[in-house]
Structure formats: C-alpha cells, structure tokens
Amino acid sequence: MGENNLFVENQYLGRDKTWISVRLILALFCFVAYYLNLDHLASRQLFFIVGAAVILISILMMYMLHYRTTVTDNYISISGLWTTRLVKIDLNSIAQVEKKKYSTFIFNNPVYNLHKNGKIRFYSGGNDAVWVTDKEGLIYVIGTHKQEELFKAIEKARRNNKA
C-alpha cells in the first residue's frame, strides 16, 4: 500500500531572507560595538561573544526543518517540527485551490498550524502561498517556495481522485 508522492517540499526555519538580514544586522552591530569599545575589556568581549553566537545560531537555524509538505493521491500532508501534530487535508473535502501571496507584510513570522480568523496558516519563508478552501469554508494557507508545482500537484491529485 505504497503512497505515490506527487509533491514534497521541505521548509527550513532560518532561510527567510528578511530574518537572515535582521540577524546579520544584529551581529554587525555587536561587532561594531566590539571594535569601538576599546576601554572596557569585559563588555568588549561580551559584544564579540554575542555577535559570534548570533551568527552561529543563524547558521544552525538554516538547517532546522520547520515543516514538510507532501501531496499524495488522497491527501495533503503537512508534518511539522518534532512535537507538532501531523495535519492531513483530504482531497475529497477541497472545494477550491488558489495561488496567492502569503501576506502583504514584509516581515512574517514562521508559523505552523496557526488558527486565526477562519484560516489555518503554515509559513516559513518567501512570498508565495497556495490557499486551499475546504467544503466547510475553512481556509488553509500553505506558504511555499514552489507555488506553481504545489498548485499543479494538488490539481492533478484532485483530478485523479475524482476519476
């Protein structure tokens, strides 16, 4: 009973360009403060340690899996980081699939299974998303870097499921 994966995408926690920029600016501030603080040795070392820690944590976050989106013949599966619950969306219950932007904001926090205002959001980075509406009116907003591929995989799975 092997499932046929039509689409698989991994979203990593630390790969969003805006948050990488924020972390690098913070590290740059620490290194500039380290360079300019010539008189106080203890605080000077602290700035260097904090700047190095920010860069190290940023590198580690780039390899930390946030969630995985999988489209099979029967469902869309979104599995999250460590202790999060697996979310399965049955393709028979889908009423509409749309390609849209995730949000109009520049900065968006990574979220997994965030229920807010009748929408369930999944996001790690990027600007694009696929909006899936089920027959009950619940909207799943799935952030992705491969919007066209995810959209086509869901449409193909829905066609195969109806036939």
Image (tube, helix red, strand yellow):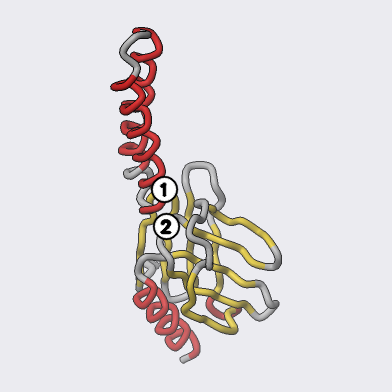
Q: Position of residue 29 (x, y in %)?
A: 37, 32
**Residue that appears at 60% across and 78% down:** 93
Three-letter amino acid code at the position of disc 1? Trp
The residue indicated by pointer 2 is: 125
Q: Is residue 141 above or below residue 94?
A: above
Residue at disc 2, secondary structure: loop
Question: Disc 1, disc 2: CB below 8 Å?
Answer: yes
Q: In the displayed structure, does residue 161 sit left or right of residue 5?
A: right
Residue at coordinates 41% horizontally, 65% vertically from top-left?
144
Of residues 116 and 162, the one nearer the viewer is: 116
158 sits left or right of 9 in the view? right
Residue 148 lies in what quarter of the image? bottom left
Instruction: Tell me which residue sits at (43%, 86%) in the image.
Output: 160
**Residue 158, how many percent across, how many down?**
47, 84
Locate residue 161, reporting x and y percent. Answer: 47, 84
Label 2 amino acid? Gly
Mark found first going from the N terminus, 1 or 2: 1
In the foreground, 3 or 56: 56
